[in-house]
Image (cartoon, helix red, strand yellow):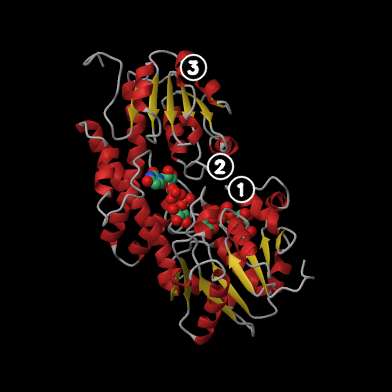
Amino acid sequence: MGEQKFTRKIACIGAGYVGGPTMTVIANFCPDYQVTVLDISQEKIDRWNSDDLPIYEPGLKERVLKARGQNLFFSTDIDRGIQEADIIFVTVNTPTKNFGEGAGKAVDLQYIEQTARRIKENSKSDKIVVEKSTIPVRAAETLNNILHSGNNSIRFEILSNPEFMAEGTGIHDMENPDRVLIGSMNTPSGQEARDELIKIYERWVPREKLITTNLWSSELSKLVSNAFLAQRISSINSISGLCEVTDADVDEVALAVGKDTRIGPKFLRAGLGFGGSCFRKDILNLIYLCEHFGLQPIGDFWQQVIAINDFQMQRFVQRILKAMFNTVVGKKIALFGFAFKPDTGDTRDAPAIHVSKMLLKEKARLCITDPHALSNAQKDLEEEEGDITFETDPYKAAEGAHAIALMTEWSQYQTLDYRRIFDSMEKPAFLFDGRNHLDHQALFDLGFNVYAIGKPDRTQFDQGSQ
Ligand code: UDX
Ligand code: UDX
């Protein structure tokens, strides 16, 4: 690397879900830029350099193969990558702090800080540093202070460029973004740096979709976007509870409400609740910020979004218990899906983790199946006590089970032979659809007792027998 003539050299520190795909897209659209993705994990970099990429994301592999070795490189040589680069993206992980002050809410900034120090130590020329990891508002200030501390003649210009892509549709989202947000300092050098980033995105993003703001607005907008999205999910899920006891149907309510163009139809799918690496973490971060500035009622408002999400999963398990004669001790329950959403193997904060733990406390026997997330599921549950098995074949997972609980709406679950599944299960056979993904009438007609989110129970039992 470094021998060809490139217009600009980009480095990205953190070859995870965000860093790997974003840099691949940039490398594809900017063949005259050298893009080097760096990570401390040798194993991860080896996989980025192999046919077995560390991330499953539709469309990613073809794009990596197109650019890798040409202008896209993956390496653990972080120091050299920093030295060579004109622009450095930071996409290291920023988990919720689980110790000390702010534990459970604040963001753990140790990786960001370590990265900043490493950039400072290895820089021999001026650089643009772009925060892409979601970090607390005013974290750019911390970065700036670390980078410019001590005797240092080198200038770093900090930009905030949060990533809005969703997993499973990451490549599509990056290639066709609703907007690209770039926050910068309102100084001539800040604007110059901002223009450097605009030059990259302009290659494929229409100019009107490039939004420029000050640094703090950009950082806050990322938290607020995720909080608003999660808020819509909790809003519809709160109504699903009401639907289940009033014979209303939450999907019908969502359709009717979403037709109002002021509200819109998206992100109104009732289900087990939101998972993923971002929503909970970013809302907790927003709450921490509110509390820090003495705005407790605002923090409490956002706390409710999380409380409803947790309540939704508890309600789901309570419904399973109630339907299955108030006990699941020793009963086999097949969990269909474990990823936090379909088309990804990612299980971070997946509702399936929380539901599994609750069912294990009730002493159920769990058989978990998922097309892409079984190895992550195994890691997530390795410390749990109880009877857990992992099975790639959904038919085998359901064999001898008392119930199926659908956790993730993988499309392949819609086309399974449910007659065959029903015949292989214990009776009465229960099906709990945590994502309103299956044909409930057809399943009921096959003999299943069907329970879907925000819909009345469809049971084979005589009225009043339960
Ligand atoms: C991360 C954050 O979780 C998210 O908040 C933010 O919005 C974007 O960055 P993600 O890419 O999903 O998201 O994280 P992850 O897949 O864990 O990747 C982070 C990578 O950084 C890992 O591969 C890790 O090895 C690497 N890393 C971490 C470093 O290279 N150096 C460090 O000091 C710390
Ligand atoms: C989210 C944001 O969408 C993205 O902009 C940001 O950059 C990262 O966080 P992601 O977590 O990958 O992306 O997935 P998303 O599609 O937003 O789904 C998050 C969770 O919400 C999933 O568990 C999904 O099942 C759930 N969800 C989503 C619902 O329960 N109902 C809905 O209507 C939509």
Q: Nearer the viewer, residue 413 or 225?
A: 413
Q: Which residue is mark 3?
A: 420
The residues bearing labels 3 and 1 have C-alpha atoms spaced at a distance of 33 Å
Q: Amino acid at mark 1?
A: Ile
**Mark 1 CB in 8 Å range of ligand 1?**
yes
Alpha-carbon neighbours of circle 1 within 10 Å: few (<14), some, or many (≥20)? some
Rounded to the nearest angstrom, the CA distance separating label 1 from label 2 is 8 Å
Q: Residues within 10 Å of mark 3 (few under 14, many from 20)?
A: few
Which numbered disc covers residue 136? Answer: none
The earlier-in-sequence mark between 3 and 1 is: 1
State the SS at label 3.
Answer: helix
Residue wearing tag 1: 55
- Quarter holding the N terminus is bottom right
Q: Secondary structure at mark 2?
A: loop
Question: Residue 260, percent across and down?
Answer: 24, 52
Q: What residue type is disc 3 on?
A: Arg
Q: In the image, is the residue at mark 3 within 8 Å of ligand 2 by its beta carbon?
A: no
Q: Residue furthest right?
A: 3
Image quarter for ligand 1: bottom right
The answer to the question of whether label 1 and label 2 lie on touching residues, with beta carbons closer than 8 A, is yes
